[in-house]
Image (tube, rainbow, N blue to C red):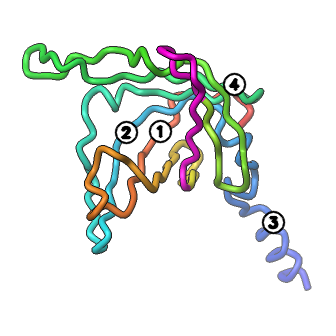
Amino acid sequence: MKYLVLIITLSFLSCTIEEDYPDQVRIVGEWGNTGRTAVLKNGDVFESWFLGDCETRTNYIFYENGNLFVDDYIDSGIQDGGTDFCIQNEETSKNGNWEILSTGKFRLILKNEKDSTKFEIEPYAIEFIEKNRLDIRYKEFEEIDQDSVAYLVYHFFRVYNTGTN
């Protein structure tokens, strides 16, 4: 009987991060882009799919209150010493909002600074790999070959959190 109580107790103590925190708490903090994986329709996987220096500088900060700060960098087309010269994307608003639609489903709401129109991004899925890793899976991108790419996954690491998780 003592062993049965011990096994039950240990099973409650061995919760994963997914069981400990809801998505709303786990996403809060600053996330830096570390890579992109392409999965082709034929099943081939490319771990490093044309992620430039500028894209790796892009960070997202998710706040508990639903606010979103995006530090988005793009390639200026100018090279400085053989590397890309990155500039902040002037079209994308730095400030936006985020919301949870359902488990693993989020909506990011940003504004185009040139014409003040709002645009919404709904990734196919957001998956928390571990406490400090996040994958965002997108189904469609217009700049890639739609005939061969099934989907893209962007990989992020937690730069910092707000102390809530």
Which quarter of the image is occupied by the C terminus? top right
> Disc 3 designates what residue?
12
> Which segment is the magenta one?
110-124
22 w.r.t. 7: above or below: above
- Residue that numbered label 1 is attached to: 157
Distance Cα–Cα, label 3 vs label 2: 34 Å
Q: Give coordinates of residue 5: x percent, y percent.
A: 88, 77
> Mark 2 belongs to which amino acid?
Thr
Q: Residues within 10 Å of mark 1 (few under 14, many from 20)?
A: some
Label 3 to label 1: alpha-carbon separation: 28 Å
- The amino acid type found where label 4 is placed reads Asn
Q: Is residue 49 magenta?
A: no
SS at mark 1?
strand
Name the residue type under label 3: Phe
Q: Earlier in the sequence, mark 3 or mark 2?
A: 3
The residue beneath circle 2 is 34
Return the residue found at the far left. Answer: 82
* Residue ID for mark 4: 67
Counting residues from the N terminus, which is met first, the one under dot 3 or under dot 1? 3
Alpha carbon separation for disc pair 4 and 1: 19 Å
Single out the mark in the foreground, 3 or 2.
Answer: 2
Q: Could you tell whether 100 is left or right of 36 in the image?
A: right
Q: Earlier in the sequence, mark 4 or mark 1?
A: 4
Which of the two labelled residues, at mark 4 and mark 2, occupies the earlier sequence position?
2
Q: Is residue 40 above or below residue 132?
A: below
Tell me if mark 3 has few (under 14), some (14-19) or many (20+) residues whose alpha carbon lies within 10 angstroms of its own: few
Location of residue 4 by image quarter: bottom right
Q: What residue appears at the point 73 percent right and 30 percent down from the top-left corner?
A: 66
Q: Residue at x 31, y 58 (%)?
A: 146
- In this view, the residue in front, 15 or 6, is 15
